[in-house]
Each structure stands twice: as structure tokens, then as C-alpha cells.
Image: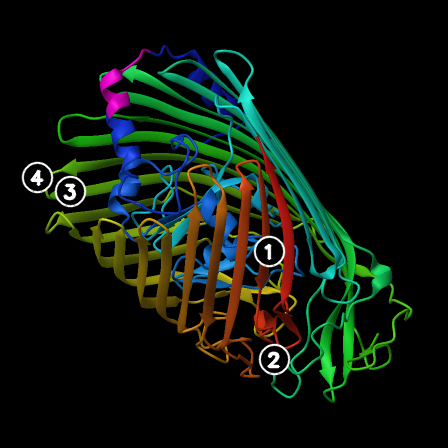
Amino acid sequence: MRIKSSSSLFAFSLLLCSLPATADPAMDAEIAAEEANGGEIVVLGTRRARADQTISSDIVTETMSQSSRSIERDLLTAAGTYRLADALELVSGVSNQNNRGGVIDNFAIRGFLGTPDGGAEYYVDGFLANRGMAPPRDPATAERVELLKGPAGALFGDIDPAGRVNIVSKTPSFAPGATAILTYGSFNTRRAELDATGPLSATIAARIVVAAEDSDGWRNFVDLRRRTVSPSLTWQPSDAVRLTYLAEINHFDAPFDRGVPAIGGDANGAPQRTFYGEPADGVTRFRNERHQLTGLAGLGSGWTLNGGIAWRTGTLRGFSSDQSRLVGDRTLWRQRRSRDFSVDDLSARLEVSGRIGAHRPAIGIKGYRLDYGERWMRRNPTAAFPYAIDVYQPVYGGTPPVLLPFTNNDERRWSGTLYVQDMWDVTDRLTLSGGARLDAYNQRIRNNRTGTVGRTIDRPVTFRVGGRYQVTDAVAVHANWGENFVLNSGTDRAGQGFAPETGKGYELGVAGRWPGIDLAVTWFDIRKRGILTNDPLDANFLAPVGSLRSRGLEADASIRLAPHWQLVANYAWTHARTDDRNFATDRVLNVPAHSGTIFALGRFLDDGGRGISISAGAAYVGNRAGAVDASGLVLPDYVKVKAAAEYALSTQLTFRLEADNLLDARYAQSSYSPVWIYPGQPRTVRLSARFGI
């Protein structure tokens, strides 16, 4: 089907509200039992709230995706996750990617990249949250982070052979509570958080999450200011009906920072704290706003209706002076740029699911309408006017060049999806699943400079199948295969749009679960076409990779050493290669062959909640390709250590001292080209006080 207007999308939510709902005690008991056991997905940490199936993975996904993990709120706090990348370190197979001047979250799963401009696709509450662009996520609003791996990690019908990240927001609780956290840390970082929830009546609960952070930044002139406000309301007139409205407003201000250049092929050769832009350019301002309504209704006889609608708007505006060329390992030519981006994204979904004997069928419809505007101006350096800066003794305040028009595109997409899936318990040990998805889309990109209009219209059908066999009560094996497609935004150096990204892949794995122990080992093999990366002929543009294949082995472990200790560990071997001869190397940008993390958490609390908690961890990242041009740049491997200690004077007052990069390792976190390398943050210490009621 094709969604032609926003009114059609909004009809989804009206339909959700208008259908009758009746209580289904049998189904409620079944869902509650499965959720109490955590489903089949491994929960890292402690799940303290019942999972809301309108904003998180469903029972079918959790059962069939044994390589997936859910990182819960308590572990997010214990691990000091101030960035999304911090959370993803706790799961195998994720690598940092170019963060576009420090204004986006970007990562690769199993060797597959997001676009260098927009970043990796990720979801918030089951809705794609960075279509077009979105600011870095603030950790205060997250209840948990789900990494749904492989073809079985489908989220409301969306399939990717590598995997999906879904951030589940904090929503209202009928149990009253409030928490305030004050933090002060290195580089004059000041942060405050407030989280309060409770009932407004017998059927309505509310929540408000507020966070504010200011920092001078560890790199010269690169300060940070961000604000997040997220109010939400839940209406639950009966056990069979629940509606939740959630809003999120984000302001993110920071100078656009391209990092440092490599010196003589050394990614760590330049001064790590030196800013090579112009302080007079000011900050780049991100403004983002999201509103969503989700709901679940019991239809009786084991069937439910699950749906939602989300609207997101945002802008990014600012100037920058970006390094363009290094001359003689000392003189850095710079390019002047301005950015003015806007996004308006409206999406909706509706799914009916239930149980028929040994089958769990589901059918869903979803769609979105996206308006995305890109306004760029730039001026390249020349020998006559290099707009240069010295790598070791920078002098700021040079006369900036006059900007010239560069990109002026308006993109509009309409997309409608119909999907069906089923999970079949063939026996008490064998479970099979399958799904099919029809996408009808219309993508239109207008180049306002030339008047050229590019249009892409298609109706691809994609499939996925999987199986799981319970060998013993503790050990299960699984196999999943799936395919996908993703629309690409933007235009190439010739002003033409890009074909969609397409992919196919499979995984084979074994998982073991014993009291206090969860282990999983998975082999995957995935191939995709049409992935965007920086153009090897002109790094100012994007270009598609002809074909990228990634295969590898992942191992994840979670061990609870009752009653005090929990250990989380992972390792990934990833062999990601391209076969496009337009690129000087077949290695994939920023994807290490070897990576792994180990994190230990010990809690020593008395019956009154008083006592000490300690944690420590280390992350290893192997060497990676730092560029796809002929430079052959390699980012060296590194080990990063963190540690923390908490002391709870009572359930109402806790103090926490933590250090990230405890050994002050010097490393390159990610890269886009030999002159755009983002250095890793040095040792960072934070002290916080948490007040609760």
C-alpha cells in the first residue's frame, strides 16, 4: 500500500482508539509469565518495570533472536553511559563511526555502516529516530537499550541482516517515585537530572524527565550545552487497554569539530586538544522535537492490537572551518562551510497479533512521510587563499572566505509497508518463524540549484525465515536468514540521487542458559549493496560501495555470581571487506577485526539499601582502516579502562565517583579521512550525588 498524506497516517491512531477492547486474563497471564522470565532475549542488568510491548521488541523477536541483548537502566548507570556508544560497548560487534563533527551518534553493527552524514539508523520506542538527522541521545530519558541482532531482530516488521538498536524511553508508572542527580566532573562539566513519576488518578499516570549539561570540553574551544525535557502520560482504564503519550524536546549546542589530522600517517600524531576550526564560527545548534502516541488493546481470545504514531521535527544550523588538506605535515588548509538542515518526519504503525494453536501470527501496516531539506554553502581553499592554520601553533581570527552555493536539496518520501509474520511451535523443542514485507515508496529529490528532480518509485518484497531448536533444557541452537532494503538520502558529486541499499544475510548460533549464566556464540555472513561512504575521488561527497561483505564470529556472556557480582563480557571477530575497485582499499572504515569488552559490577547492600557498589571494565578495539583513499591510514588499537564506586547512605542518598579512560590512553576513536580523525577523550572523572524518594 502507499500512504499519500499525513491524514492517512493519523488514521492509524484514530483506528487504535476506536476499536473496542475487552480484557483477556489468559493472555495477560501468559505475557506476564514470559516477561517475568525476560522472554528469551538476554537482559543485562535488572529489569524493574514490565516491558511495554508498544515501544519495545515483541515476544517473537525475543524468542528467535538469541544473539540479541537488552541493557537495562541499572547497568546503564553502573557502566557510566553518558553517550550511546558507551552503552553499545556492552554488546559484541558494534564499532564507532564518524560522528560528523560531534553532532550525531554513529556506529556500525557487524561491520555495516550508517551514512557518514546521517549516521547509523536507530530506533526510539520502535520508531526510526534519526531519519534525516538527530542530535546525540541524552542518557537520562532511556529505560533500556535493546540491540536486536541478525535477521530475527525485526522490530515491527523492519528487517536488517546485521541488526537494529532500539532505545526504550522511560514512561509513567503508577508507583510514585522521584530521583534527582547532580554531577560535576573534569573539564568543568556540570550536569543535573530530574526524573519524577506517579499517578494523577486511578487510571492516569505521569512522568517528567529533565536533563541539563554544560561543559567547557576537553578540546580547546569545544564547549557543550544541551537540554532535554521529556514529559509523558499513560492512560490505563483497564488491564486490557493502555495509551501512552510521550514528548521529547532536545537542544544541543557545540562547535562543529572535525578533530585532528594524521601527521606522517600517524593518527595520534597531532596535538589532541587543539581545535583546528575557528572559534569565531560559534556553535552549531541542533533543535529537535518528538511527539508520539502508542497504545495496546486486548481484543479477546489471545489477540491484541498494537499501534502508534510519531511526529518529529528538527533543525541543524551553523558555520564551521573544516580542515581540507595537510601541506608539509604542518600547514592545514581549511574549507569554510555553513549548514542549514531541516527535517519533518511523520510515521505510524498498526499491528494485530495473537495465537492460533501453536502459531503466533501477526499482520501489520506502517508508513511514513519525510520532508528533508539540505542547505550547504562552502568555499574550498586554494594556493592563493588557503585559509590555513598551523598544526602546532594555531593562530585564530583569519579572514574567512566568502561562501558559495554548494548543495540546496529538498527531499520528500512517502512510504507504506504491509508485513506478515508467524512463529510456529512445531514441537516443544522446535520453533520456526517466517515473515514477508511489501514496501511501496516514492522518493523525490529536487536540486534547487539546477532544477533537476530525481524520483525513485518501487514496491520491493523482502523475506526472512528462522528456526530454533532446544537441544537440552539449557542449550539451544538457532539459524536465521533475511534480506532488507533502505532508502538513501542525498546526491553524489554529479548531483544524482542514490539507489536504495539492499542486503541479504544469515546467522547460525548456539546459546546456553543456566542459573545465573547466559552464553551465546554466533556466526554471521552478510552482504549488502549501495551502502554510502565518502567518495574516494572527492571526500566532500558521498558514493555507494558496490558490494560490502561482512562475516564473523561473536561471543557474549553474562554471569551473575550470586548474590553480589555480575560480569558482562563479549568478543567479536569481524571480517568486513568491499569489492569495489573505485576504492583504494577493500577494508571498511572504522571496523576492527577484533574487539571485546569485560565489565564487572559488585553490589554490597544491606536490607535497608545501604552500602557500597563497585564496578570496573575494559574495552579493547583493534586497529581499523582510517580512510578509504590511497593514504592507507590505519587507526591503532587501544584499550580503554573505566572504574566507579558508589556509596548509598540510604535509599534516598547515594554518592558516586567514576573515571572513564582511567589509564589516560591516547587513541583515535573514529575517522572519516586522513584530516578528519576524532580523538578519544582523555581521563575523565565525575562525582555525582543521587537523591531519591
First in sequence: mark 2 or mark 1? 2
- Give the left or right position of residue 513, taking residue 207 as reference: left
Tell me which amino acid carries mark 1: Leu
The range drawn in magenta is 22-29
Tell me which amino acid carries mark 3: Thr
Which label belongs to residue 431? Answer: 3
The residue singled out by tag 1 in the image is: 657
Tell me which amino acid carries mark 2: Ala
Which label belongs to residue 267? Answer: 2
- Find numbered disc 4 in the image and state the secondary structure of the residue it sits on: loop
- Give the left or right position of residue 87, taking residue 22 as reference: right
Magenta: main secondary structure:
helix
Tell me which amino acid carries mark 4: Thr
Task: Name the image quarter holding residue 242.
Answer: top left
Which label belongs to residue 330? Answer: none
- Find numbered disc 1 in the image and state the secondary structure of the residue it sits on: strand
Q: Are marks 3 and 4 in contact (CB under 8 Å)?
A: no
Q: CA distance from mark 2 to mark 1?
A: 32 Å
Q: CA distance from mark 3 to mark 4?
A: 7 Å
Q: Residue at x 24, y 52 (%)?
A: 480
First in sequence: mark 4 or mark 1? 4
Q: Is residue 1 visible?
A: no
Whole-percent x, y for residue 222 in the image: 75, 61
The residue singled out by tag 4 in the image is: 427
